[in-house]
Image (cartoon, helix red, strand yellow):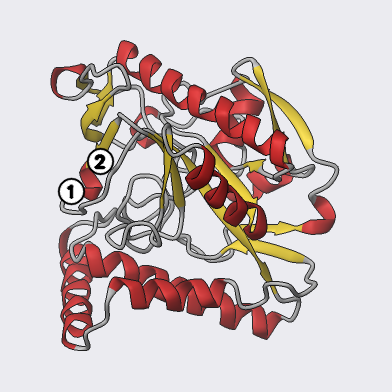
Amino acid sequence: MGTFYTPETLEKIQGEILSILDDFLAICREHHLEYYGIAGTGIGAIRHGGFIPWDDDIDLAMPRKDYEKLCRIVKKDYSDRYYMLNAKTSEEYPLMTARLCKRGTVFEEEVMKGVHCPFGIFLDLYPLDNVPDGKFARRKQAWTAWFFSKLMILRRIPRPTLAQSGLKAQLIYAVCGAVYRLMLAANMSPEYLRKRCEAECRRYEGKTTRKMAFLADTNPYWNTIDKENLYPLKKIPFEGRELDFPANIDAMLRFQYGDYMVMPPEDKRKTHTPYRLIFSDGTVGAGPEIQKAEHHGDTEEGRTSGTGLPEAGREQQRTGGFDATGGGSV
């Protein structure tokens, strides 16, 4: 059971997201930026030819250099329509993902209550960084980046959403509270944590490696792409458009979700669950527009995430960890 959209509200959210996607694709074509659909967007494209029926976001990954260029282009040429929300543009934002948000909209999620950011209807963006070929070096980079990404979340959300309950949840909350107080006592600012995390993610920038990854996820190995299996990019229809996906998208999805062609049970489907929702035409979609239901469901497909943060996929949740965003996970 959960809080879900009425069909009318979901259709309107998806329409807003597609309008952002169209401009994103135009920017990528004009400036030769590389991107790939991942996670729930891959499942939706292959299984449904578009959105997963209950999905309320689109997940896109970009190599770091293309992502950084996109940030500059949006700020310079599209700031009248869009803004990039990330931990660099807004110190309150607790994630290493980024959101391309549409101006004039509001999309404030339950798991982000108390986080004072300009949350709007968005595309989810995952910058991919080079990871080393050596197993020890890769493990060191992965877990260091992961550790600081979790501190970033706790610094802004000391009581994150948990999948666990009972005594286990109480113990996790006690640890989270202790870590939060230690960070305050040590004067660890959100900006300090972001810089440490980003520096670790970008440690091998400019070096030749066989793989790249988004390390600040529930599991730092979850979104890893082998460059040899990435090309040629595969175009797959998505809501009347064609999106680029890794050549081995099927293998990636099966590694992450198992048999992703099987629809998850209704109690495993979830959405970002906004408590405040305003569309670009000024109409309000929160309150009575959002309903309690046993169907509809998650934004992305599947991993069992131990909490509720943004990850690139939640058709079913993954185990472990704490989350805080409803779209990118810890």
Q: Which mark is residue 113?
A: 1
Residue 102 in view here: yes
Which residue position holds label 2?
Answer: 109
Q: x and y percent of residue 224 in the render? A: 65, 59
Image quarter of the N terminus: top left
Q: Where is 265 relative to 15, above or below?
A: below
Q: In the rendered structure, are the residues bearing label 2 and label 1 in contact, judged by CB atoms less than 8 Å apart? A: yes
Q: Where is 192 relative to 284, above or below?
A: below
Q: x and y percent of residue 28 in the render? A: 67, 38
User: What whole-number distance in Å separates the C-alpha atoms at marks 2 and 1?
Assistant: 7 Å
| Amino acid of disc 1 | Lys
| Amino acid of disc 2 | Glu
Residue 304 in view here: no
Left or right, 164 with reference to 35: left
Left or right, 106 with reference to 249: left
Left or right, 79 with reference to 65: left
Q: Where is 213 relative to 11, above or below?
A: below
Q: Where is 85 relative to 92, above or below?
A: above
Camera-side residue of 213 and 54: 213
Which residue is situated farthest in the top direction here?
Answer: 8
Camera-side residue of 305 and 309: 309
Q: x and y percent of residue 238 in the render? A: 63, 22
Residue at point 48%, 64% (across, down): 216
Secondary structure beneath label 1: loop
Which residue is situated farthest in the bottom direction here?
Answer: 186
Q: Could you classify mark 2 by the number of other residues whose Cα lies within 10 Å: few (under 14), some (14-19), or many (20 or more)?
A: many
Left or right, 134 with reference to 222: right
Residue at point 40%, 62% (across, down): 88
Image quarter of the C terminus: bottom left
